[in-house]
Image (spheres, rainbow, N blue to C red):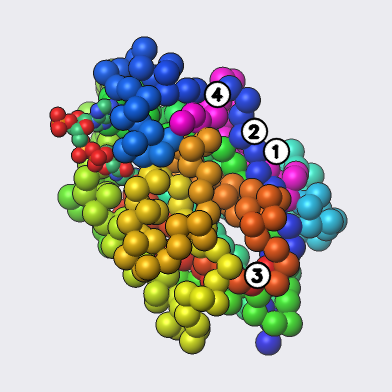
Amino acid sequence: MTYSKILGTGSYTPERTLTNTELEQLVDTSDEWIQSRTGIVSRQIVVDENTSDLAYQAAERAIKDAGVDKGDIDLFIVATVTPDMPFPGVSQILQRRLGLNTITAFDLNAACSGFVYALNVADKMIRSGAYRLALIVGAETLTKITDYTDRNTCVLFGDAAGAMVLGQSDTPMIKDVVTYANGDIEGHLTMQGYPIKENFKTPEQPRPFLYMNGAEVFKFATTALPKTILTLLERNGMVLDDLSLIVAHQANRRIIDKAARTLKYPMEKMYMNIERYGNTSAASVPLAIDEAIKEGALKKGDTFITVAFGAGLTWGGALITL
Ligand code: ACO
């Protein structure tokens, strides 16, 4: 039986820092409100880079960290809801720039859960025996679709990319991955696309932006996170004490706080870097995993759970031994 394992990780954030104080100049908000309601102090945002530029840097770092030959990579997935353009995908744009062979390369849209979805797909494709070495990336430039006159959303988001190289393993190091979607028919978290146009006319459309019903998403997230963690543990005959760390999607400190209280799990074992990056959607989980490893919060042999939620509504998690 073939399983998969993490061979290397990498991440990248753009240089420009957007502080809460700067946001105070744009909308009716305050550093105090943002920090106390979300935990965010600042975020990194793009100036002239696009999603593929962030993904490129993170991918190069993960490949270097894994010490693999690019020519051996046979699967490339980019999770994003903010591609450079509708097509070609970020994965296809980057395939040549990264110097990869003519391999399977596609984008995957599951919003903030996108990286966990990509992990699930790549793990299963490697387990099938059809693929041997996968590069998976979560990359977003959410600031492109953020309305900087809407205080409900503009304080939350930042730009980033995180990447992971997965290879074959005789033992299940990626122990289990679960992913779910429930169809957000109420439209709690949406980004309008192109409307169906009147035949033969090209209408002038106002630029669409991300819409979020924060309170509803908050309720959903604080239920989905602990439930997913308990599901993963139960399915694998494990308990919370078996985990070295939980790496949750960094959307709001209070969501992670509430999940920890529900689980009666110590807050210091819930990884946190939201104060520096805000919510970076599909990049959030791989960025947090990479930083946790580089900071020594996750070491070889450690078992951890990563868990995410987002538009769709989607959610999911993975139980991993490094
Ligand atoms: N500054 C000051 N006041 C604000 C701000 C702000 N930036 N934003 C909202 N407020 C106000 C509201 O207008 C409201 O005022 P009112 O009572 O006069 O109407 C008040 O603060 C309380 O608003 P709430 O929405 O109840 O604030 P809450 O404490 O719930 O925090 C937040 C809002 C941070 C958005 C929270 O609901 C949240 O984090 N939700 C989850 C968001 C999320 O995780 N999204 C992830 C998915 S993103 C993706 O997939 C692309």
Q: Is residue 84 shown left or right of residue 56?
A: left
| Residue identifier under label 1 | 57
Is label 4 or label 1 in front?
A: 4
Q: Amino acid at mark 1?
A: Gln
Circle 1 Cα neighbour tier, 10 Å, few/some/many (<14 / 14–19 / ≥20): some
The stretch in magenta equals 41-62
Residue depicted at 49% across the width and 29% down the height: 42
Q: Secondary structure at mark 3?
A: loop
In space, the residues marked 2 and 4 are separated at their CA atoms by 17 Å
Is label 1 or label 3 in front?
A: 3
In space, the residues marked 4 and 1 are separated at their CA atoms by 18 Å
Q: Amino acid at mark 4?
A: Thr
| Residue identifier under label 4 | 17
Sequence-first disc among 4 and 1: 4
Residue 240 within the segment the image draws in magenta: no
Callouts 3 and 2 close, C-beta under 8 Å: no
Residue 47 within the segment the image draws in magenta: yes
Q: Nearer the viewer, residue 276 or 214?
A: 276
Image coordinates for residue 256, horizontal then vertical, percent: 39, 54
